[in-house]
Image (cartoon, grey):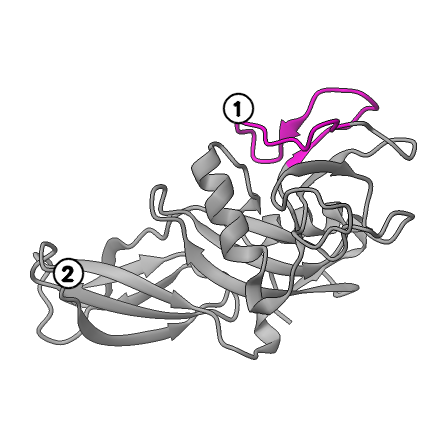
Amino acid sequence: MHPAFPSALLFLRILGGPEVEPVSGHRYLLLEPAPWPESEQAAQVLGGHLASIGSPEEQRWVFSTFGNRGGVERSLWIGLSRSTLGGSFSWSDGSVTTYRNWLPGQPDDALGGEPYVHPISRTNGFGHPGGTWNDLRTPGAPFTDFDPVCGVVELPPLELRFDAAPTAGSPGFSCPTLPGFLYRIERTDDLVTGEWVDAGVSVLGDGLPWVTELPAAAAEARSYRVVETAPATSVSSVVHLGSQGR
């Protein structure tokens, strides 16, 4: 178990991603079905929050990317919630965006209070438009018509930085990583043509920043990027949560 994670009482597997939203450069992950609080805690363990949706374009991108991932129709937890019955909603990352995409008649705080928000699945059983927002208490208790509901995690863009040399006379890269994800540094001499050249450096993310020596014959004047991929099957791609999220 990764030392940054508390004792494992709940496991949330990463079902998809990272996918990069083209405008913001933010990265998004899809988690397995779980209640909103556990999904938000998993997002924080991964270094982000459940997604904040700021525009119709972002809403369409998130829902088209994850609402039918792997051929499974699902609803999606986003970072919008409220703490009191009938109170105002706020984003878990502190965003102040006022964009909303409510289903007509929502939010209604039914069933004694529904504090969490999700775009509903296309196969919701009511004929409601897929992707419109509904407030909900939690899957399976007692309302199951919108299940499964999976959290969408939003992470900041990858940052590739130069650091003090890890070995004498050689500059190095550093980059924050996600546990279980594979990272490859690529370089290019020409950003205009987009012809990236593999620099031949690979590391396995462990949830902490890593530093690696520049590849042989590489020059600081060139441009670099990080390629981030999640292994198809890996126990490291599981987020471990402790009892405080239960």
Calculate the distance from the C-alpha at mark 1 to the C-alpha at mark 2. Answer: 35 Å
Residue 46, how many percent across, how many down? 56, 55
Q: Is residue 173 left or right of residue 30?
A: left
State the image quarter where residue 106 is shown.
top right
As displayed, is residue 218 above or below residue 89? below
Q: Which residue is mark 1?
A: 96
Which quadrant, please, contains the N terminus? bottom right
Residue 145, how many percent across, how many down? 82, 51
State the image quarter where residue 119 is shown.
top right
Picture residue at 79% right of the left edge, 64% below the top:
9
Judge whether residue 69 is colored magenta.
no
Judge whether residue 100 is colored magenta.
yes
- Magenta residues, as a range? 80-107
**Which amino acid type is shown beneath numbered disc 1?**
Val
The answer to whether residue 47 is seen in the rendering is no
Depth check: give the residue in front, 1 or 229: 229
Residue 75, how many percent across, how many down? 67, 51
Depth check: give the residue in front, 174 or 241: 241
State the image quarter where residue 169 is shown.
bottom left
Instruction: Name the main secondary structure of what is drawn in magenta.
Output: loop
Q: Which residue is mark 2?
A: 194
Which label's residue is closer to the chain start, 1 or 2?
1
Depth check: give the residue in front, 43 or 3: 43
Q: Is residue 37 left or right of residue 79?
A: right
Q: Is residue 139 left or right of residue 21?
A: right
**Which amino acid type is shown beneath numbered disc 2?**
Gly
